[in-house]
Amino acid sequence: MLGTASESKKKIYRIIYGYWQSQCVYTATNLGIPNLLHYGPQTVEIIAEKTGTKAEKLYVVLRALAHLGIFVEKPGRVFAATELSELLITDDSPSIGHFLMHITEPDMWDGWRELESSLKTGEVPFELAKGKDFYSSFMTENPHSKYLFNNAMSFLTAEAVDPLFEVYDFSRFETVMDVGGNQGTLIANIVKRFGCKGILFDLPHEVETAPNNISKYGVLDSVKIVGGSALESLPKGADAITMKYFLSVFSREDSIKVLTNCREALPKDGRVILLQTLVPSLGAPVEYPDGTIPGLAAVQMMITNPGGYWRTEEEYKDLFAASGFQLEQVVHTGTSLTVMEFSPC
Ligand SMILES: C[S@@+](CC[C@H](N)C(=O)[O-])C[C@H]1O[C@@H](n2cnc3c(N)ncnc32)[C@H](O)[C@@H]1O
């Protein structure tokens, strides 16, 4: 197919193949094949038997994944693990495999199908496709999707904390509240590393399961857990509020509501610490060294989030200014995560 293709055509072909790749790797991961191959090479017949699939068809998918470097194919239709498939193991701790399955699961694809119509109507693609919102109704009604989402968030946070803590010191705060903190991985790490107290705030159905995760870090006694909506009000008691990939959930109007609630909850010398991947301004590199393309990720956010997406540094500054906050400092972590620290003005 590529015989006569120019470099430009090849690039387009690669983009087209993008979803074939992610669907093959989703299917194999969902069937638990990286988990199986971790214990040693297997013939396609054995893998098919263990996964309840048809060997002839499964072979076509596994061969494709071997061509992509996810598995290795050996003589006799035997497949073995690689460094890549080991990253996709999902029966141990939260991994990139959970992130992969969360992002590429069929319900997500349903949302993408509505992208074009959502551009015309302004509605949220996921809500158009499913008739319900992502964070409340869908999450409470779909425990497996919630399990994938929560593990994906915990994995991304666990990866981010070391580089973050190297450049940003939380020890000057007495109590840090992580708003939209999901299962509490970030706040547990802050409390453990810096010895401050913590508050975890998220939707009630999310915080219900957080104690289990926080206790793994041995800091459950130092973290107060509060369920609610940041659009309504936030508890007082913290001198700093962290928001990691949280403000990007909301439209401009709702972001201002959330930030106004932050102002009311914080003391005058309090801080809001935005932890976010920033979309580059025009002319800046479009891809981070870790492979994140924030402009593209912004579209994924727009698929599920009720009005939000990833923004540029200027856009965040503008949102905070409109909510009565001034920028104190911007700290780059050396990964795709940037810290923007704001104070009430
Ligand atoms: C993209 S996730 C980010 C999670 C976490 N901060 C992280 O970086 O891993 C957004 C989080 O916001 C929570 N959330 C959504 N709407 C909310 C609301 N109105 N009030 C509080 N939390 C909300 C979700 O439950 C979810 O945990």
Image: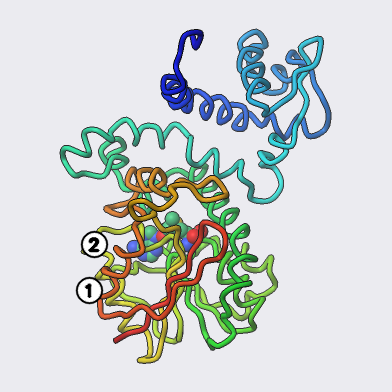
Which percent across, then down, holds residue 145? Answer: 49, 43
Q: Residue at x 35, y 44 (%)?
A: 299
Q: Residue furthest left?
A: 121
How crowded is the residue under tag 2: few (<14 C-alpha within 10 Å), some, or many (20+)? some
- Return the residue nearer the eye: 106 or 242: 242
Circle 1 sits on which residue? 322
Instruction: Using residue 200 as the reference point, say whether residue 127 is left or right of it.
Output: left
- Return the residue nearer the eye: 23 or 204: 23
Which percent across, then down, holds residue 245? Answer: 43, 60
Q: Amino acid at mark 2?
A: Arg
- Return the residue nearer the eye: 342 or 330: 330
> Residue 252: which disc?
2
Badge 2 marks a residue whose secondary structure is helix
The answer to whether residue 269 is visible is yes
Q: Amino acid at mark 1?
A: Ala
Marks 2, 1: nearer the viewer? 1
Which quadrant holds residue 310?
Answer: bottom left
How crowded is the residue under tag 1: few (<14 C-alpha within 10 Å), some, or many (20+)? some
Q: Is residue 98 above or below residue 334?
A: above
Tag 2 and tag 1, C-beta contact below 8 Å: yes
Which percent across, then down, holds residue 120? Answer: 16, 37
